[in-house]
Image: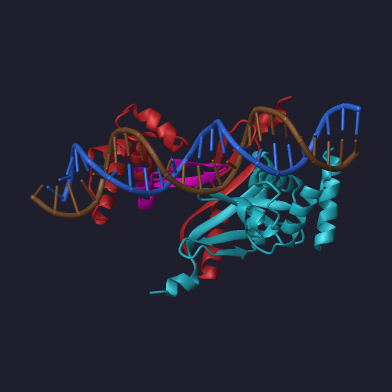
Chain colours: A red, B cyan, C blue, D brown
DNA sequence: CTGTTTGCAAATGATTTGCATCCTA
DNA sequence: TAGGATGCAAATCATTTGCAAACAG
């Protein structure tokens, strides 16, 4: 799943929603699909190096990307981070409160439990997030 | 575990941290320990009906309550909610994006998975949150 | 007494919104 | 060409911070 494929999926999403495929949206989406990490709206704006693109548009486009299911948003203390989801294995996060590192982990059994809970409650899931806050191994060793 | 017991635990926490036990802190904590739901800082300020207590102090005290482990903070879209944790079973949340309802669920097996992950990574956990966003059964039935 | 804590008001900072202009479809 | 999309600037809004006065130990 490369950037090109992801962009196509995004375009299909826009069309399915009767939304315009604009140059601005494509530039923003391409930058997101190139990413390998967790970033906030301002990070993305900086990476684009296109001062003409307004931060407001970044927010609006990130919202579209999340709705499309290609990108995921996670709520941290006082800010939201985004990450590309398409073409990546399902995972959750460990966040170090010391160094800010975000570690990812995969745990199918945990995901199974979540699926069971959603089923148990007859809840229509749109998204979910599992975040463990604490101190990473590296920071534990620091003096 | 009633309000009085919880307050005592909070006082012990304050003493252990060499922090002052003040009337303002006790009033805020008592209101929190009376709560049965999820509330934000402003909700709490309103419930106190003590205009003299500054919102800033509410935030500062909620922070202490979270550090003490008696209260838990959850990050939602653009705001934080708090809930009393002491004297209640461990649980996670389902949040309805339509009506805003917050459903709680208990799932020991899910908690076990989290414990295993934390162990696997040798991560020192401080807190965690599992939030499933979606549409609750009641809202699914609405036209 | 003496350092904390608090109230108040101002500052912050991420995100949202109004609106005229621009650009897809 | 029409209505959605964008840039820009202003508005929001929860939360934080600086500081002098009030208070706990």
Q: Residue at x 71, y 49 (%)?
A: B52
Where is residue A140 shown, x and y percent of the image? 70, 31
Could you tell whether B98 is left or right of A133 in the image? left
Relative vertical location of residue A123 with respect to residue D9 in this rendering, above or below: below
Which residue is more in the foreground, A104 or B61?
B61
- Judge left or right: residue D15 versus residue A89: right
Q: Position of residue B6 (x, y in %)?
A: 81, 57
Q: Quadrant of residue B131?
A: bottom right
Relative height, residue B31 to residue B25 (above, below): below
In this picture, which residue range is highlighted in magenta?
Answer: A61-88
Where's the N terminus of chain A, which quadrant?
top left
Is residue B62 one of those drawn in magenta?
Answer: no
Residue B22 seen by the camera:
yes
Residue B25 percent coordinates (x, y): 77, 48
Residue D5 image point, x, y percent = 26, 45
> Considering only vertical position in the picture, is C2 above or below B59?
above
Spot the residue most to the top.
A143
A79 part of magenta stretch:
yes
Q: Residue at x 51, y 68 (%)?
A: A119
């Amino acid at each position: 799943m490369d950037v090109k494929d992801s962009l196509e999926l995004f375009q299909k999403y826009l069309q399915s929603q009767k939304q315009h495929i604009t140059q601005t949206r494509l530039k923003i989406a391409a930058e997101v699909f190139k990413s390998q990490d967790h970033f906030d709206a301002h990070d993305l704006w900086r990476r684009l190096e296109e001062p003409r693109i307004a931060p407001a548009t970044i927010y609006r486009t990130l919202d579209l990307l999340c709705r499309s299911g290609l990108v995921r948003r996670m709520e941290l203390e006082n800010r939201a981070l985004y990450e590309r989801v398409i073409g990546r294995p399902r995972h959750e996060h460990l966040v170090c409160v010391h160094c800010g590192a975000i570690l990812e982990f995969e745990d199918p059994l945990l995901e199974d439990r979540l699926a069971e809970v959603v089923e148990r409650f007859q809840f229509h899931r749109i998204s979910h997030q599992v975040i463990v806050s604490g101190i990473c191994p590296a920071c534990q060793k620091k003096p």
